[in-house]
Amino acid sequence: MGPPRPALLPPLALGLLLLLGAGAQDEVLENGSPACPKDATRFKHLRKYVYNYEAESSSGVPGTADSRSATKINCKVELEVPQLCSFILKTSQCTLKEVYGFNPEGKALLKKTKNSEEFAAAMSKYELRLAVPEGKQVFLYPEQGEPKHILNIKRGIISALFVPPETEEAKQVMFQDTVYGNCSTQFTVKTRKGNVATEISTERNLQQCDHFKPISTGVSPLALIKGMSRPLSTLISSSQSCQYTLDSKRKHVSEAICKEQHLFLPFSYKNKYGMMAHITQTLKLEDTPKINSRFFGEGAEKVGLAFESTKSTSLPKQADAVLKTLQELKKLSDSEQNAQRANLFNKLVTELRGLNNEAVTSLLPRLIEVSSPITLQALVQCGQSQCYSHILQWLKQMHAKPLLVDVVTYLVALVPEPSAQRLREIFNTAREQRSRATLYALSHVVNSYHKTHPTETQDLLDIANYLEEQIQNDCTGDEDYTDLILRVIGNMGQTMEQLTPTLKSSVLKCIKSTKPSLLIQKAAIQALRKMELKDEEQGVLLQTFLDGASPGDKRLAAYLMLMRTPSQSDISEIIQLLPREQNEQVKNFVASHIANILNSEELYIQDLKTLVKEALRESQLPTLMDFRKFSRNYQISKSVSLPSLNSASAKIEGNLIFDPNNYLPKESMLKTTLTVFGFAAADLFEIGLEGKGFEPTLEALFGKQGFFPDSVNKALYWVNGQVPDHVSKVLEDHFGYTKDDKREQDMVNGIMLNVENLIKDLKSKDVPEARAYLRILGEELGFARLRDLKFLGELLLINVPDSLRIPALQIREGACTSFRETDLP
């Protein structure tokens, strides 16, 4: 028989249990949840709010009816609330109207547009799910097939409908999520019924919203007149104001009226009247029926409330049009209609700007096949992100010369607002070329990209990992390439530091190691110039400076880096070391630098000045020695106080570091710094020079028996009697020449002999080394070496046509012949 079955619940009891369960769930939903507190939303769950929506946009000059245009949208809007802070937006019964005239009172006369039915179908085809967790940021979950322009209209409805919960304060400023991004909003409670606000107004300046980006047209980066697309956006005043009427019992929105105004300031009167565009949205509540559905499914795609670009994706027809224009342009070279080339090329560039990145990628091989040179010119003139990235691809496909790749890569990297694709293309080029221009270009584009895409870090991490690999094993790899990598790291140190802390650790290992050359050790110290120096880094720099066995210029490089943000103990140790410092070059430089800090008027080092004074209470700086033989720091600073404004200061600083074994300085630096209106100090520009091995060359050129003194003496003897006496006397006094001296009578032969001796002498000497760098606003643009000049000279000689060389040789020989034939003594 089996065990007895449990008795079935009576239908009445079962219904009562379900009702109690539903009531308990409603109570939980009514009280809210941690993710959505009850006060975070004005709309109750299990309700549907039905509104009549109306939006009208007009542009022109008010009072001039014939010059105005207008468009009007009407829709039925339903906002379902299956869960707290979760909504489903449905739009139906939409109409689209446009103006066809104005009545005598100036009111627009509207009629349905031809595509009104198509618009209505698009608006009602998909519902839009959205969530507002904690009542702050709005997240949308659109259907995959929802067009961007339809989604933007629905965004406008949502933005106008959502009001932040009021507080006890009648006025306050808060940040609110809108279709223009996160906007600072002036929130005002106009009337209350008891403790409940019934009328609220909001005001916001749209130009202060973080996603407010006026549309700009493409302009060629080579154009002398860049157009007014971007500056024009600053001449437009954009504002929005909303008025809300709220239900005194349930607190939901009964009516919302939002008005936007975009005023063109140059043609305005008192910044109020003139050429403008108006957008007015109105929502009026019609019904609030109950609903039973609690289901809310988040879609696969999650987007924000801010408007998305509705730039049309490139259709095959558009790509074919670009190809056809290029083919027509190519045919003109075989015809006599070259007058049409400018118009056709302008058409080609304009059509390229209308394509998106995917279209340009697929179209590029076909364009190159038709005409590679014209394609490159069009890509350069395009001035859009989708074109810049493909310039580098063009160079690779055409196997361009490395010098051309370097130049183009560097220029492309300087264009603002880089895309992820451009960043990857420049990174790939830098890895392949491994040249100065491409790696410096990489540093510039990394800094620009991180400013505009602070949350997109994967590509930047790949770059950081690559750079770290190049300085493994304590920077003992190829000297020139390791030096270049360290300079590039220094250029983007602030960005790299935020991405991967291990990169800084690798740089510190290079500083502490004695395996790499002095050049690499100093470059590793300079790689920290944009990074934040914490206790570990300051400790390494201090120990490097205190190490008397290290070269003097490495110690001074560590000292200057340490003095950016030193502690009291750091300065005390440095000052205590000075009296017993054995390296006179180091001692004199540090003493002059500290003395300049004490005398400086610069604003941002006042705290540092206080630390130095505290450390010097029981100590005294050494006496500065001859500036012509010993290293020294030079500073000139001035501060100015302006009425009702923050003080401003400027500083010009220079370093001159001597080699103790020679009479020439081996390093020099000149830098200007400006501090204004409370902003952080900014290094306007910095120029640095470094060289060694110039003494033999200078001796051969300017020494007692050098080329120039001996040649000048010969020239003075040769011109004696041919110039006025007082001029001859000055030359004799200046060069120590006397008329009794016997000189070579044939000046030309004598000087040519001097040239031969000079060349032989220089060939026997070590080749001098020198480099110079330039930094503007803290960004190092690059550096040049002395041997680069030799390379450029050889490049010019190679490219000089033979037709130019032969006449030049004939002219030189003819000049010598006529010179000898003269009767001059």
Image: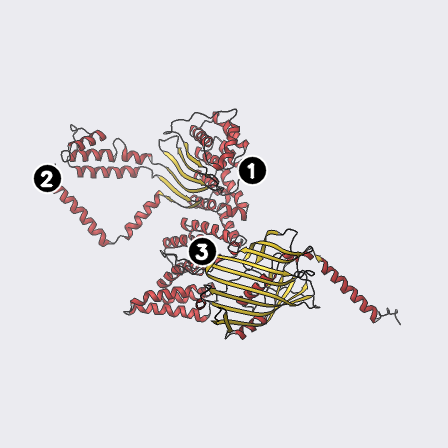
Q: Which mark is residue 823?
A: 2
Dot 2 alpha-carbon crowd within 10 angstroms: few under 14, some 14 to 19, many 20 or more: few
Q: Quadrant of residue 386?
A: bottom left
Amino acid of disc 3: Leu
Residue 370 image position (x, y, % from top left): 37, 67
**Residue sticking out furthest to the front:** 104
Picture layout, residue 62 above or below residue 488 = below
As helix, strand or loop, the secondary structure at mark 2 comes to loop
Which residue is disc 1 drawn over? 535
Element carrying mark 1: helix
Kindly identify which numbered label has been placed on residue 232.
none
**Quarter of the image where the N terminus is located:** bottom right
Is residue 125 found left or right of 411 in the rendered image?
Answer: right
Q: What residue type is disc 2 on?
A: Asp
In the image, residue 355 sits, relative to residue 414, either above or below, namely: below
Q: Is residue 752 visible to the viewer in this orientation of the structure?
A: yes
Q: Is residue 164 left or right of residue 654?
A: right
Choose the circle earlier in sequence order: 1 or 2.
1
